[in-house]
Image (tube, rainbow, N blue to C red):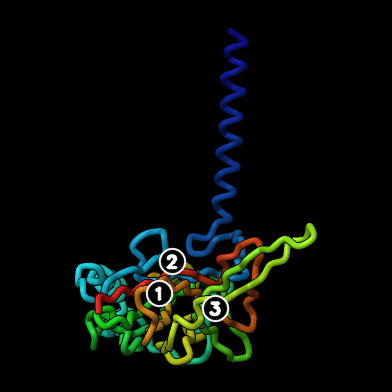
């Protein structure tokens, strides 16, 4: 009987200690901001439309069903960016400078305001003037966004980050005298043709940063960059890579080859 009583008291004390530890730990957590964060030095890029995990956009100009799904996907993605919705939910901010909303000691400045990103900024790729985003004429639009990172301030000295797209580097490894030599060729550079960016120069304005988190910034709208391909070579695979450029974001991370960039295949078929 004493042994049973001992174990009952022992496990009650053990459970109480565990509960006390959990209670103390929970008091240190902030509902709006993670206490600990693995800070990403280079955030990733994402493209839209994207139908699956293959990062391939393939369609035939004359076959409406082959590209209509891309136009519909862009419509769904851009609908929260309608000017009327942004005017209701978000704030008109001062461009070309960070929108800082710091807390005052223990007084939390929550919820934090978010800046408007209006769909009209994307101009020819907004879907407002061309509901098919150029897909019906072989001049498709691709939307690019920078992944969210809490507290990230991508750019210094007033220089906003920007995106550029080009032919993806193709690496060929050759062995010469027991030594591997890597050669880089851009064999799709003559196929990609002319591109235009919206906003101009493919920039992410500084006023959309820093990001304070989903709970603190409920209505946050990620800034977007659209790239429109004007005369890409048809009936051929074109491998494209888009990269982020900022004066305080490192590039060329060997441990994560997708950091700060996104690659995809674009193939536009034509029966003419």
Task: Work out whether residue 79 can be spotted.
Answer: no
Q: According to the image, label 1 marks what residue?
A: 220
Asked if the residues shown at circle 3 and circle 2 are in contact, with their CB atoms under 8 angstroms apart, the answer is no
Q: According to the image, label 3 marks what residue?
A: 244
Q: Position of residue 170 (x, y in %)?
A: 57, 70
Could you say which is closer to the camera, residue 23 or residue 173?
173
Could you say which is closer to the camera, residue 145 or residue 192?
192
- Against 100, residue 33 (above or below) is above
Q: Position of residue 12 (x, y in %)?
A: 56, 27
Disc 1 versus disc 2: distance between alpha carbons? 8 Å
Q: Residue at x 28, y 78 (%)?
A: 135
Q: Residue at x 26, y 83 (%)?
A: 137
Asked if the residues shown at circle 1 and circle 2 are in contact, with their CB atoms under 8 angstroms apart, the answer is yes
Q: According to the image, label 2 marks what residue?
A: 214
Quarter holding the N terminus is top right
Task: Work out whether residue 119 can be spotted.
Answer: yes
């Amino acid at each position: 009987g004493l042994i049973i009583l001992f174990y009952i008291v022992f496990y009650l004390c053990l459970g109480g200690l565990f509960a006390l530890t959990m209670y103390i730990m929970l008091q240190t957590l902030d509902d709006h901001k993670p206490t600990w964060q693995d800070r990403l030095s280079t955030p990733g890029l994402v493209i839209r439309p994207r139908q699956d995990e293959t990062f391939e956009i393939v369609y035939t100009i004359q076959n409406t069903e082959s590209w209509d799904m891309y136009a519909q996907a862009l419509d769904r993605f851009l609908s929260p960016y309608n000017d009327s919705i942004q005017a209701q939910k978000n704030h008109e901010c001062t461009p070309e400078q960070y929108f800082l909303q710091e807390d005052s000691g223990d007084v939390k400045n929550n919820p934090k305001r978010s800046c408007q990103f209006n769909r009209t900024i994307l101009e020819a790729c907004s879907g407002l003037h061309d509901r098919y985003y150029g897909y019906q004429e072989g001049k498709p639009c691709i939307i690019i966004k920078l992944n969210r990172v809490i507290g990230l301030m991508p750019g210094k000295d007033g220089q906003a980050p920007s995106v550029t797209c080009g032919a993806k580097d193709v690496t060929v490894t050759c062995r010469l005298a027991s030594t591997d030599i890597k050669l880089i060729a851009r064999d799709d550079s003559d196929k990609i043709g002319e591109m235009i960016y919206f906003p101009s120069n493919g920039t992410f304005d500084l006023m959309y940063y820093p990001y304070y988190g989903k709970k603190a910034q409920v209505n946050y709208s990620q800034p977007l960059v659209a790239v429109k391909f004007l005369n890409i070579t048809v009936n051929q695979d074109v491998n494209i890579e888009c990269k982020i450029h900022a004066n305080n974001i490192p590039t060329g991370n060997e441990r994560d080859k997708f950091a700060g960039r996104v690659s995809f295949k674009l193939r536009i078929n034509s029966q003419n």
